[in-house]
Image (cartoon, rainbow, N blue to C red):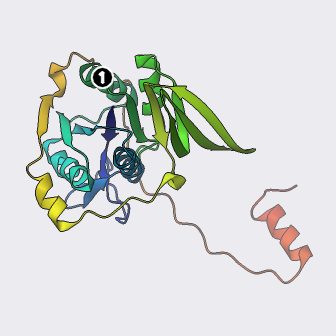
Amino acid sequence: MKIMVPIKRVVDYNVKVRPNSDGSDVDLANVKMAINPFCEIAVEEAIRLKERGKADEVVVVCIGPSKAQEQLRAAMALGADRAILVETDLSLEPLAIAKILQKIYDQESPGLVILGKQSIDGDNNQTGQMLAALCGLPQGTFASEVTFNESSIYVTREVDGGLETLELQLPAVVTTDLRLNEPRYAALPNIMKAKKKPLETLAADSIGVDLTPRTKLLSVSTPPERAAGIKVASVDELIEKLKNEAKVIS
């Protein structure tokens, strides 16, 4: 079985992001980029499934600029077998990404698609669900455990009331949550080997998908600083300030 793992190139989670001086977008100049943390969990799970003999090949896919080859090589250093880069400099919306991934899915015919539940930049949590709908596949979102049973998989997910376990017939789409696993670190020999693994590059506009955005980014700004708190000497003083200063009670 082949596993396809879509990943995203994002600002490293340790970096404090800031807007451009004109507020048009996030400032990405000289900023460290990395694999989206949820995508890294998806890569790790795919590699573990391969190590357990449940898969023969792990293919990672990224939609982004040419510099995203760095993140694809990093995924291959972790254990993925080959990579596909759909190259574009556009900032694509989840629906356009899902449509591109559908084309790659039709081309690759994987038995399982595993991807992060959301990216830490857009936080949309939409691509996996849209991809499953476009491909007509069953889906298990927010997976905290994945186990195999011949032609199906069991996906355990955390819900408000506890844990819910779904049985999905393969092929299927699974999105990963934080507690699914802890990604490994790439060893130096594997980093060197990853440089020789195959990486296919496709132009996004050659795939036949309408990439026209349906929303427009108006501005980006930092949140306002919170005012410092104060201490009050009595309940009466607290009520007075809530009534007359904060005006949250009458």
For this rendering, which residue is in front, 81 or 61? 81
Residue indicated by mark 1? 109
Residue 235, placed above or below residue 74: below
Residue at 61%, 42% in the rendered image = 157
Q: Residue 85 in the image: x percent, y percent?
A: 18, 37
Which of the 4 quarters of the picture holds residue 101?
top left
Residue 231 in picture, x, y percent from top left: 75, 81
Is residue 98 depicted above or below 161 in this figure? above
- With 9 as the anchor, is 189 left or right in this view? left
Tell me if residue 225 comes above or below residue 60 in the rendering. Answer: below
Determine the residue positioned at 17% across, 41% down: 65
Q: Which residue is at a point 19% across and 27% down the rendered structure image?
A: 204
Q: Write the residue at 41% across / 45% down.
A: 119
Task: Give the residue furthest to the left.
Answer: 196
Amino acid type of the residue that numbered disc 1 sits on in the rendered structure:
Ser
Q: Position of residue 100 (x, y in %)?
A: 29, 24
Q: Quadrant of the C terminus?
A: bottom right
Q: Is residue 27 visible?
A: no
